[in-house]
Image: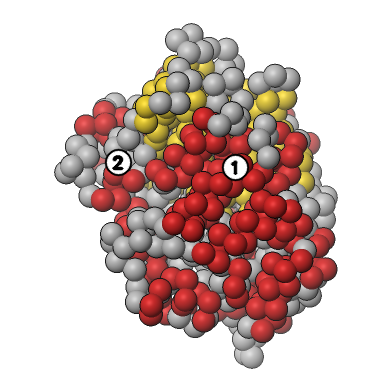
């Protein structure tokens, strides 16, 4: 984000870590590239190639993507393979029981498009299901079990992408995930820790206990972990497309198990689900085109607003304290609007023309005091929730220049912890991303806006911000998990890329976050912002919060002059994510 905030040797540090000395999880966080589909560069966080590049949070998923490329698939097929493999090997972050948002670039036509496979509320959604008898919010029903789950979007979204933009049949792209589920895999440390963290909730539901405690015991490092029920469901999807999930035997089992455990899903809810193709948000910043997520994500609007606020400023000529001051004030203003206006575009009228207008940003910029923090309390106040923290992102560029930036989620770690009967499908807890109880604080002590109130068939607001940044000579595919911090991570990554940083430096750079409320600046622990800069920020009126690491960014950068594509995975320790999760 700033010169000091971006350790010059960030990527080098990542590369220098010896595989043998690195903890086990460290070796699974890979950015892999493959040249002529022959050589996998593993056990490092960055790798470069002249053909195709994939960065994801799990090596087995990245390999699944390359396997599909090697069989003639394109970036879309590879993203489908990565996403379905993650459903098996990284269920704590995303899966077939959840949803995703993706931007796609078609190299042949130059077209950019956006796929909305966000979950939606079942028709029978009711505020009373999320209230305790005393009228206070019931965090258990909004986060755990079937009432917490929206109708999944991932299977429909993948089938839609394969049919319209893939080169291979869906069944081909699902093959690696089916094999992983049938033959088994060695679970990552992050998965083992997630199972331990959610053990009490998982054990409440027999199918969840059967899946995550095979033989009644928690899996150990080195065990082979199989998921035959999910393999069967993936095969139904492979054979019948979306109907294999949303209709027929799988749909009946989903509905039966959800209703038996107190949920409200119906067969009609499942049959009504459609993935939607939408126009991405496109804006110009510093000579680059930024292509990013529109509603039902709040991320693209917020990123656009922040970049528009900064556009005429000469950040480079500012001292570091003032540079951070302007970044934080842009974040504050964008998050205020995110809280007030945004929701599902099919249900809510949003003033997008205003929010995306440079003239609107001019007004916001003028409200920034040159040497003083604005207090959030001085701005018209709308409080909203910070969405969940556990998600996953993958970035793909194929040899022809097709690109996919895809962020997928089941919301918080292991979603609702509810596995739906014999389907093997772990359901999301995305209902908590709605402002579920009007006028009542949510899990984060905050109050949501009416634009994001739950209604049957409506999609809950997301922060997922899959993005492309396209310049004349270089481009980047960017995204990260991390709830509301996704937006500021992507914002920081865009600025770093435009500043000339490489993929490794972008993922490694220390992060800064402000989200209007709480009114404080989160600065990542270990940041090298000097004490005198922090003192200046405090003197300007900022509350500084030294915060554990967050995010798990996966980036691919393509230098078109040298034709080198570099993939980089986030060097942060997933233990850091575990600590973020504990903030719930
Ligand atoms: N569930 C996290 C998000 O969509 O922002």
Secondary structure beneath label 1:
helix
- Residue 465: image location, x then y, percent: 59, 42
Residue toward you, 215 or 419: 215
Q: Which mark is residue 527?
A: 2
Q: Quadrant of residue 132?
A: bottom right
**Does residue 96 appear anywhere in the picture?**
yes
Instruction: State the CA–CA distance, disc 2 to disc 1.
Output: 40 Å
Residue displayed at 54% across by 21% down: 399
Residue displayed at 63% across by 56% down: 235
10 Å crowding of disc 1: few (<14), some (14-19), many (20+): many
Residue displayed at 56% across by 31% down: 71
Badges 2 and 1: C-beta atoms under 8 Å apart? Answer: no
10 Å crowding of disc 2: few (<14), some (14-19), many (20+): some
**Does residue 356 appear anywhere in the picture?**
no
Identify the residue under disc 1. Answer: 173
- Residue 358: image location, x then y, percent: 69, 28
Residue toward you, 528 or 35: 35
Mark 2, mark 1: which one is toward the viewer? 1
Residue displayed at 16% across by 43% down: 21
- Residue 392: image location, x then y, percent: 50, 49
Q: Is residue 584 left or right of residue 402?
A: left
């Amino acid at each position: 984000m700033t010169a000091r905030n971006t350790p010059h040797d960030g990527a080098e540090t990542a590369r220098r870590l010896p595989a043998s000395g690195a903890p086990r999880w460290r070796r699974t966080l890979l950015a892999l590239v493959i040249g002529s589909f022959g050589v996998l560069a593993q056990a490092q966080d960055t790798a470069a190639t002249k053909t195709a590049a994939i960065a994801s949070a799990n090596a087995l998923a990245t390999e699944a993507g390359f396997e599909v490329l090697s069989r003639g698939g394109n970036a879309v097929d590879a993203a489908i393979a990565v996403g379905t493999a993650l459903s098996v090997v990284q269920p704590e972050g995303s899966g077939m029981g959840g949803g995703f948002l993706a931007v796609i670039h078609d190299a042949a036509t130059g077209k950019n498009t956006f796929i909305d496979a966000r979950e939606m509320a079942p028709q029978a959604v009711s505020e009373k299901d999320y209230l305790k008898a005393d009228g206070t919010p019931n965090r258990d029903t909004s986060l755990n079990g079937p009432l917490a789950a929206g109708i999944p979007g991932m299977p429909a979204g993948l089938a839609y992408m394969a049919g319209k933009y893939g080169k291979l049949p869906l069944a081909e792209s699902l093959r690696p995930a089916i094999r992983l589920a049938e033959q088994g895999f060695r679970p990552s440390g992050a998965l083992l820790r997630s199972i331990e963290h959610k053990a009490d909730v998982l054990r409440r539901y027999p199918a969840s206990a059967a899946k995550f405690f095979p033989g009644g015991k928690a899996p150990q490092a080195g065990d082979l972990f199989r998921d035959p029920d999910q393999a069967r469901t993936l095969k139904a999807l492979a054979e019948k497309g979306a109907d294999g999930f949303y209709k027929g035997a799988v749909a009946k089992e989903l509905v039966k198990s959800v209703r038996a455990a107190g949920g409200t899903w119906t067969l009609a809810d499942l049959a009504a689900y459609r993935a939607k193709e939408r126009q991405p948000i496109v804006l110009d910043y510093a000579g680059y085109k930024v292509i990013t997520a529109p509603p039902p994500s709040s991320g693209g609007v917020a990123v656009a607003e922040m970049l528009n606020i900064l556009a005429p400023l000469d950040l480079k000529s500012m001292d570091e304290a003032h540079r951070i001051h302007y970044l934080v004030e842009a974040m504050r203003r964008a998050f205020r609007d995110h809280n007030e206006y945004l929701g599902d575009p099919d249900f809510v009228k949003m003033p997008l023309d205003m929010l995306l207008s440079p003239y609107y940003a001019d007004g916001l910029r003028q409200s920034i005091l040159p040497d003083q923090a604005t207090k959030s309390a001085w701005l018209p106040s709308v409080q909203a929730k910070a969405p969940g923290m556990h998600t996953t992102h993958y970035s793909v560029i194929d040899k022809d220049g097709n690109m996919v930036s895809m962020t997928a989620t089941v919301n918080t770690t292991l979603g609702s912890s509810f596995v739906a009967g014999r389907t093997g499908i772990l359901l999301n807890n995305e209902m908590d991303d709605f402002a579920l109880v009007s006028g009542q604080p949510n899990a984060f002590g905050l109050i949501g806006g009416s634009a994001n109130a739950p209604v049957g068939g409506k999609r809950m607001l997301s922060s997922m911000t899959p993005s492309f940044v396209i310049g004349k000579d270089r481009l980047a595919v960017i995204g990260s998990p991390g709830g509301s911090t996704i937006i500021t991570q992507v914002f920081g990554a865009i600025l770093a890329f435009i500043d000339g940083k490489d993929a490794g430096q972008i993922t490694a750079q220390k992060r800064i976050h402000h989200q209007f409320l709480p009114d404080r600046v989160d600065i990542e622990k270990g940041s090298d912002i000097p004490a005198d800069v922090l003192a200046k920020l405090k003197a300007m009126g900022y509350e500084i919060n030294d915060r554990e690491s967050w995010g798990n960014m996966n980036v691919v950068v393509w230098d078109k002059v040298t034709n080198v594509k570099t993939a980089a995975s986030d060097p942060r320790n997933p233990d850091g994510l575990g600590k973020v999760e504990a903030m719930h």
